[in-house]
Amino acid sequence: MVRLLFALCALTAVFATATPATAETAGPAPTQAAHLADRLRENPVHVTDQLPRAVPRSTAPDFARLARKTGVPTYVLVLPSPSVQDGKALLGAVHDRLGRDGLYVLLDDRSVTDAVAYGVHAPADDAWTVQLYELPYDAGVLASFERFVEAVAEGPEKAAARARAARERYEDDEPAPMYVSETDRRNQSFLTGMLLTGVPLLILLTAAYAGRRRRRYAGRSTGLTEPGRHSGHPSGLTEPGKNSGHPSGLTEPGKNSGHPSGLTEPGRNSGRSARRMRLAVVSAAAAAAAAVAVALTATAVFDQTASSPAKPPTPAEMSARVERVAAGLRQDPVYADPESPRVLDTRQQDRLHDRIRAFGRSEGGGPVYVSLVPQPSESEAAGDAELFAAAVHAKLRADGVYVVADPGDGTIDVFNHGLRLDANHLFLDLPESVSLGDRRADEADDHLFGERLDALMTFLDKTPRTDRPNDGFAPAPAPSPAEETALPPLFATDFWPGLGVGAFAALLLSAVLAGVTSLLLRWRKPTPRPAHTLSLTSPTEPSPSYLRRTAQAEISALTREFGASGDTGEGTRAWDCLDAATLLLDGDLDRARRSGTDPATLLAVIVLARAGRAALAGDDNTLCCGVNPLHGPGVRLSHVRVSDAPHDRRLLPVCAWCRDAAIADPLGTPDRLLKLPAPSGGGRVPYYDATDGPLTAVPRGIPRLIDKVRETAGVH
């Protein structure tokens, strides 16, 4: 009997020690798989409550809607990645316990991680490849599942071809991100600020430089004084006979005017002021339009408001897991997450319960609550074990030591809430072999939680007691999910520094452009052509407006070229031409462009101005084409017909073109004569018969025309 009893005891001991070992090898997956199979039996889509920041449970209907498009029974599991050690093995175990054929899909907080078809014809592997390669990493789990479903619905052949094409295209690269980060938004704000000040300011600076360059060139070319300077006269001209001794109002060269001709240009100040005002208005309007365009374009292009496609969770979804764990701890001080692999066998759990009860009975001890729950970053506590323990303590409303053991990464964190334990000892002296584990723990599937939790209880037994309860440190609250993914406004953060950098960049760029422009203008400075080589227009019956425009252009050109030539000698032909033209305009050069000026006077001004420019260019010819003075210099004297009468001829200087035309078509010369409006106001007559003024001297040469002008003006 003794031997029999001893044998029975030995056999019992063998079974007692062998059973836990068997549970360790076969227990974890079936326990997790059984729980998940029960969830799928209730609903073919199970969304964990551990990922509210990325996949709220309210998205389950969206997954169900997409799953129906596959055409086969589809079962969907959304779990945190630390809870899954082997996805395909887990799906196989869930299928065995559920006992239903179909397409089983496993997802984490980002994408489809595994998919297996049981008893149905579905391209699970190719569809998984399609969603992996075609989508960027930040597309989101719902978009990933949608792309997976699209590939499944296409059928095996198309899904295989699509997977092959996606793999070839993105083998060494991946699609561009769909969402921008907070750093990207700061860069966008900085760029917007730069453009918002840089572009308008560059427009204003460029317009100002162009206007200044134009005024400098005009002043350098004409040598004119500004109205009222050095003359004492509002128009910029000296009055006839004042300070000059010249009835035309001209000062001697270089006297009181700063211009070799002694001329100022009256009335140009108002025109320049008007042009400057127009330039300022146009440049300001262009700058304002550019600023508005930059702001609107940036708002349209940088239109994202969130860095993630995740839907904001509700408060109930954020607290669901804490409530579940707290409810479990009310029933048992050791709570193992049913969605995670099992890390404590029955013997280890019993041992841990015994140690917890013993610690509760010890002096200064109390309850110990162990949560074997993963801490993903997308959980309600954002992966903060201390924050999770504080939330469970607040929900449980019981003081004690709260232990958070993560079955995913194998870490163990300890937090004291209301017990008389030395906080510094708990925080500083907890061995790393307990909190982080060692190499053996990293290689083991269960992270050796049984041994490490037993060592933790020994550490708690030896922890010094204090006189009063110690709650440790209050953890900072987790960031709000909406605020965590919300991007800052475009016109904020680095937008303000961008404004300053944009202004500086505009100043720098405008300076560079001005320097380059100056160098190019110096390098490509055109060489002035002699006046007699200019291409001249020559209408036979010019209109008054044409004569006004041409006279204004020619007298301005003569004044400008005279100042640039440095000619200061009175009595030169260029000076005499300029003097005579000024006398015709009564000293008011702007009169040439005003309506009401006699066409004969305008024609005489044109002839004198062109003759003066030719003299400055070194042309000694004093003849002007008598057929049409607008043709320019004459080359010879010739008897030409001036009417249809056979013997009505006049000896006139002719240009080369009129000479050749008279030889080729003598009868056509009267039609080529320049005709001005008749003095009586009806019809047109040849220019030399249109007036008895100085214009009648044109056929006899420029010197005679100058003398005729001075005689008419009473100047000797």
Image (cartoon, rainbow, N blue to C red):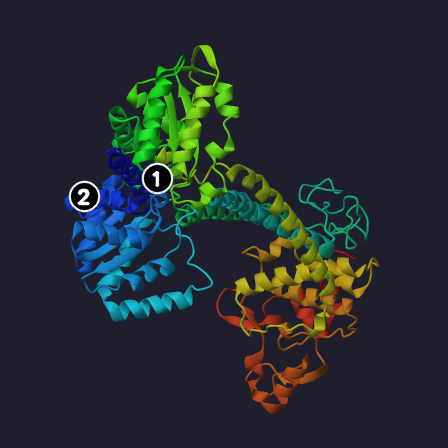
User: Of the residues shown, which amino acid type is indicated by label 2?
Assistant: Asp
Residue 623, percent from left and from top = 73, 75
Residue 294 is left or right of residue 88, and the answer is: right
Q: Is 625 above or below relative to 481? A: below
Residue displayed at 43% across by 56% down: 176
Residue 512, percent from left and from top = 67, 53
Along the line of sight, the residue nearer the viewer: 581 or 137: 137
Residue 553, percent from left and from top = 63, 61
**Is residue 446 at all visible to an observer of this figure?**
yes
Figure quadrant of residue 92? bottom left
Residue furthest to the right: 569
Residue furthest to the bottom: 664
What quarter of the picture does the N terminus occupy?
top left
Q: Nearer the viewer, mark 2 or mark 1?
A: 1
Q: Is 158 above or below relative to 666? A: above
What quarter of the picture does the C terminus occupy?
bottom right
Nearer the N terminus, badge 2 or badge 1? 2
Q: Secondary structure at mark 2?
A: helix
Residue 185, percent from left and from top = 46, 43
User: Of the residues shown, which amino acid type is indicated by label 1?
Assistant: Val
Which residue corresponds to mark 1? Answer: 343
**Is residue 586 at all visible to an observer of this figure?**
no
Residue furthest to the top: 467
Disc count in the image?
2
Along the line of sight, the residue nearer the viewer: 551 or 117: 117
Along the line of sight, the residue nearer the viewer: 29 or 674: 29
Q: Estimate how packed mark 1 is, as few (under 14), some (14 to 19) or many (20 or more) residues with alpha carbons within 10 Å.
A: many
Q: Which label sits on residue 38? A: 2
The span from disc 2 to disc 1 (Cα, nearest Å) is 20 Å
Q: Estimate how packed mark 2 is, as few (under 14), some (14 to 19) or many (20 or more) residues with alpha carbons within 10 Å.
A: few
